[in-house]
Image (cartoon, rainbow, N blue to C red):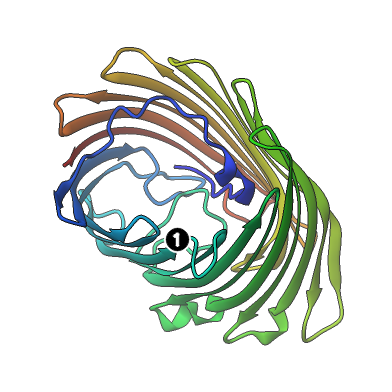
Amino acid sequence: MVVACACSIGAELTSELPETFAPRGFKTGHLACFPALSYDLTYTDNATRVTRHAQQDFLSEYAGCLSPRFQPDENVTLSASYEFGWHDYVRNTAKHYLSHRASGEFRVTNAFIEGLSFSAGDSYLQTGNTSALENQILAFTRYDTNTAFAKTQYEFNRFSVSGKYAYSLTDYFRRADASSDDHTNSGEVEGAYKFLPGRLSIFGTYNFTRTAFDIVPLQDFDTHTVMVGVRGTYSKLDYAVSAGYSAALNVNRHGENNGPAFEAALAYAPHKRLLTSVVASRRFVAGVLTGISTDTNLKAAVTVRLTRRGRLSFDYTRNDSRYLIGSTQLSLAYTTSLEYKLTRYAAATVSYARTEREAPAGTTVFLINEGHLGMRLAW
């Protein structure tokens, strides 16, 4: 169980341990296919995430995935992925559900002129449950989400500029949950300068997002965020840090929430067997029940490569949500996991997680202990 601790600049980091379980796929000409199968069994001592009278259960999950990639030219890539999963509560404490996950992306580099790149894609998810610490999706009900985007970027010498547009929606299957249906339109512009190529880049971004609720338009709001930061690599440290200001404005009524915003991602690999990372952010989000909230997220992780086949990971996640109406909610997660490569194609995972939520009286507070066994086959 983890909190969604999204930090957009985290994608800029490249430090990682040597990949132990990287699939090789099947290739023919310009086409490569990467099939995978997985099975996971999770024991939980609080399956329904309640404060009292917790029920124990086992969640058995099966998934099959196929990811083709077509690259007719070094500058053109077309990739896709589809995964089907079945999720079964053995003791029937919650409803069984299936899931579909599909995505596709088209990417062109050096399009028409050198330094110009373009990408567009779409991702779709249909499922019936979420992480215990997911604040933005209602639990134990079926829903689907879809996100489409288009992005273009141009690099010239040390300068680069990019623009991105994205549209996303969340739709709940039950009519009783329809008030939480929402969709967003967002646009982002970024400019960057490589002050020290490969070591230090200075960048600035502006993002505008409109979040609209389909049934309750009084909760609609716009978010404006301006950020300035630096990113790059210094010795064995990868970093991306930015700070700025963000404002959330109600669209159909008076009221706003504004304040400083920040994002930070650090990854340090002192040698090939050890990787440490920290990701932190402060941002506005669309709470499904309470509207605008300010989320401060922190995730710290340590990964140790024990042998050529195995690695041990420790994660700590903290989410502090402060809603516009004044209430607060604190969520914590602690996870320890061991991954071991059994053969060239098979890997096993054993993990333990403890998650807890603290909130004002009258809202959901819970404590969950979970043990997990997993097996993955990837070719």
Of the 4 image quadrants, the one containing the N terminus is: top left
Residue 109 seen in the figure: yes
Q: Choose between 184 and 16: the one closer to the eye.
A: 16
- Which amino acid lies under the numbered mark 1 shown in the image of this protein? Ala
- Looking at the image, which is closer to me, 186 or 195? 195
The number of discs equals 1
- Counting from the top left corner in percent of width and height, residue 45 is at 37, 38
Q: On the image, which quarter does residue 235 sit in?
A: top right
Q: Is residue 147 above or below residue 49?
A: below
Q: Kindly give the residue lying farthest to the front in the view shown.
A: 113
Toward the viewer: 258 or 104? 104
At label 1, counting other C-alpha atoms closer than 10 Å, the crowd grade (few under 14, some 14-19, many 20 or more) is: some
- Whether residue 65 is visible to the viewer of this picture, yes or no, is no
Image position, residue 365 (x, y; %): 57, 47
On screen, residue 80 above or below 182: above
Residue 280: quarter of image: top right
Which residue is pictured at 35% across the width and 12% down the height? 306
Left or right relative to 170: residue 251: right
Residue assigned mark 1:
139
Instruction: Identify the residue at image location x=52%, y=78%.
Output: 181
**Image check: 108 left or right of 60?**
right
Q: Quadrant of the C terminus?
A: top left
Q: In this view, does 206 lie above or below 300?
A: below
Q: Position of residue 174 (x, y in %)?
A: 40, 79
| Residue under the image location 61 percent in, 51 percent down | 8
In this picture, is 298 found above or below 313? below
Specify whether 175 is left or right of 281: left
Which x, y percent locates residue 238?
A: 61, 31
Is disc 1 placed on a helix, strand or loop?
A: loop
- Give the camera-side residue of 237 and 249: 237
